[in-house]
Amino acid sequence: MSAQWMVGIAFVVLAGCLAATFLSIALDARVESWDGIYKRAGLIRRWWFRGLLTIGVVTFAISMTWLPYQFARSAQLTGTPVAVNVKAQQFGWTLDPNCLPSDKPIQFNVTSIDVNHGFAIYDEAGNIVGQTQAMPQFTNVLLIALSKPGTYTIHCTELCGVGHSFMKQTFTVGGCGSSAGGCGSSCA
């Protein structure tokens, strides 16, 4: 079951509990005194808050390992990453190198020489596999593993001017040159 389905089911269950609580209080308001309802509602609110706080803290703690923060990624990926220097400018990308091995982690060092750009990597099926910002006078690091050989496309996801829609670049992972999973001189 996907994470989206689990979140959806959790939302429906929690919303149902909240609706049942309000319905119970509303029905009891017809026959119970105001003071009794007020005290019970206060007690329910306190427990509801504690429950939501507990769920929120546990969810946050568990999801920290899924987030693409550099410290989490570097702990998950083994080996020395291949450094790729990326420069953005209106309306193109410069990658050095642009052919990468498929069996090593890759560290994209992304910067811009003019305005902010969104650096997004898409696989051959059009799915986004990594994203960061390209900013002037600052280098963002995107540490990622691209184990599936093929041609990947970089698109700008930050509106950067009139040529924004044409700002794309491709690079190859694996299958280049003579070395297995590496890049030889034939991949440019």
Image: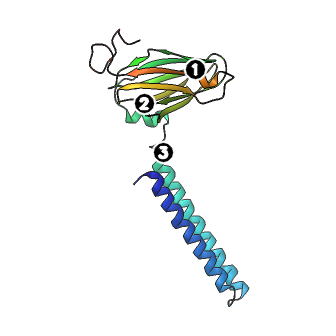
Q: Position of residue 176 (x, y in %)?
A: 33, 16
Give me the residue at 70% from left, 80% from top.
38
- Position of 176 with respect to 125 (left or right) is left
Q: Quadrant of the C terminus?
A: top left
- Residue at 45% x, 37% y is 72
Whichever of callouts 2 and 1 sits on the residue coming sooner in the sequence is: 1
Q: Quadrant of residue 23 in the image?
A: bottom right
Tell me: residue 147, above or below residue 177: below
Quarter occupied by the N terminus: bottom left
In the image, farthest residue toward the bottom: 31
Residue type at numbered disc 3: Met
Q: Which residue does the numbered mark 2 point to in the structure image?
A: 124
Provide residue 119's location: percent of width, then percent of height.
55, 27
- Mark identifier at residue 64: 3
Name which residue type carries label 2: Glu
Q: Secondary structure at mark 1?
A: strand
Neighbourhood count class around disc 2 (C-alpha, 10 Å): few under 14, some 14–19, many 20 upward = few
Q: CA distance from mark 2 to mark 3?
A: 28 Å
Q: Mark 1 = which residue?
A: 111
Question: Secondary structure beneath disc 3?
Answer: loop
Spot occupied by residue 121 in the image (x, y as percentages of width and height) = 49, 29
Q: Quadrant of residue 178?
A: top left
Q: Could you tell me which secondary element the residue under label 2 belongs to?
A: loop
